[in-house]
Amino acid sequence: MLNPSAHDDAASATAAVRPWDDDASRVLALVSQKGGVGKTTSTVNLGACFALNGHRVLVIGTDPQCGLSRSLGLGPQQLRGGLREVLQAGLPLADVAHATVLPGLQVVSSDAWTMSEEEQYKSLMAGQARAFVAAVDDARASFDTILIDCPPGFGPETRAALLAADGFLVPVQAEELSRDSLARLLDHVRDFSAAAAGAAALAGLFLTMTDHRTRMSRRVAALLGDEYGDSLLETTIPRNTRLSEMAVDGRPTVIFDRRSSGSRAYFDLMDEILVRRLRRGRSPAAPAPRAVPRIAAAVPEPVADEPPRRPALQSAAGGADRPRSPARLLDDLRRDGGRGDAAAGGFAGLLDREDEILEASTDLVSLDDLLEEEEHGARGRRDEGDWGYGDDYYETVN
Ligand code: ADP
Ligand code: MG
């Protein structure tokens, strides 16, 4: 965000009903050095989770391959304009935003389908980064949360996204090569941010396509935890075929199979991002978030024919009167009025209950509780220490 003052008026007029605590955390770019690590999948599903949580969400696909709009079932026939029009003719993003199956979720595509359109788009992105930043800044008045999906690497699209965003998220595959490329990416971003005031700060790394059965996956996760500490988010996205089916279905996985392990993980990821933001927003000088066992350290070697077990959580997590999980609190707030209706509790109420949330954050799995209770009306397997990732936990994509 280069020009926060442009939004002060709009932000203060609607501050009481903003889902985010402040204006400086709600544009997130998904970047990585490597392709195929889950940026687009994460953008779509996180965007859908935020939309289901009551946010007005815009997802922007800056990849010239239009992977984001394709994942949402939108091709050249359905789209009428995209980033090229924004960069060339100065159209607002809202004017080229396309509806999706979710009323709260809109998408803007690079909308470059031929070779010449792609070339044109790339040179516009390289030469008109400021126009992109200004368009995103303007869109803050119309959307609560904006997610920007980037192509792999550190090209003009990623640089423009980093200038426009408040924070960036990095999906990382738990494999040795990803560790190397991650270090390179973060070096690039550090240099870039030093030169370009206002560039996005690291909002977190998260592991994707994890497979707890493999020793390599657990080892790399442990090393990343050691190297990046609290920058590595606690939520991991498992390898799950439902996520890979999204492009075929043309809808976010969290819509067509909400109970899959992949969907649950994305709801957890959203909760973690929100709770972290609330923590930081309330007390910038607060100590670093409490260290939580990383998956590699926490997960024992799986026993044949038995799903891996989540380590026993602290006393508060097991009792009948334990604090509510962050997901439960957020879910209560959704029922209270979602958009943050202060009178009804809403997100303003969330701030008043920060202590409760922070205490509850010892409980790392979120949607599982809700789903178990929805289905059975009783506490489920989590109290017995189950990971709760469901039957498709072991599904892999080969
Ligand atoms: P990127 O945008 O980083 O290039 P994608 O999100 O397009 O990566 O994912 C690359 C491929 O991997 C796609 O075919 C996608 O469906 C699949 N995929 C992504 N995340 C997962 C996951 N957690 N489990 C299984 N397949 C996944
Ligand atoms: Mg992609």
Image: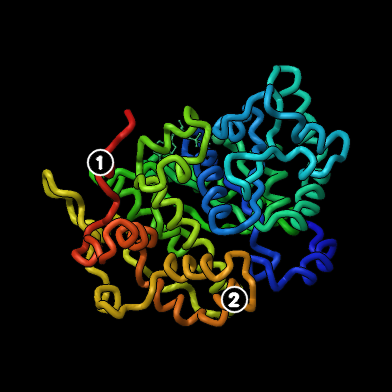
Q: Is mark 1 within 8 Å of ligand 1?
A: no
Report if residue 188 is visible in the image: no
Task: Identify the element where label 2 is drawn.
Answer: helix
In the displayed image of the protein, which residue is found farthest to the right? Answer: 89
Amino acid type assigned to the residue bearing label 1 in the image: Tyr
Report if residue 385 is visible in the image: yes
Q: Residue at x 61, y 33 (%)?
A: 69
Q: Residue at x 61, y 42 (%)?
A: 149
Q: How is the image coloured?
A: rainbow
Look at mark 1 in the image and give the residue it sits on: 394
Q: Position of residue 339 (x, y in %)?
A: 62, 65
Decide which of 221, 393 is in the foreground and name it.
Answer: 393
Decide which of 42, 173 is in the foreground and name it.
Answer: 42
Q: Residue at x 34, y 57 (%)?
A: 371
Q: Residues within 10 Å of mark 1 (few under 14, many from 20)?
A: some
Left or right of 169? Residue 206 is left
Q: Is residue 249 above or below residue 264?
A: above
Q: The C terminus lies in which quarter of the figure?
A: top left
Point out the frontmost of discs 1 and 2. Answer: 2
**Marks 1/2: CA distance?**
42 Å
Image quadrant where residue 141 sits: bottom right
Image quadrant where residue 317 sits: bottom left
Q: Residues within 10 Å of mark 2 (few under 14, many from 20)?
A: some
Q: Position of residue 51 (x, y in %)?
A: 58, 53
Which labelled disc corresponds to residue 9?
none
Q: If you read the primary sequence from the N terminus, does the residue marked by circle 1 or circle 2 appear first?
A: 2
Q: Is residue 161 above or below residue 242?
A: below
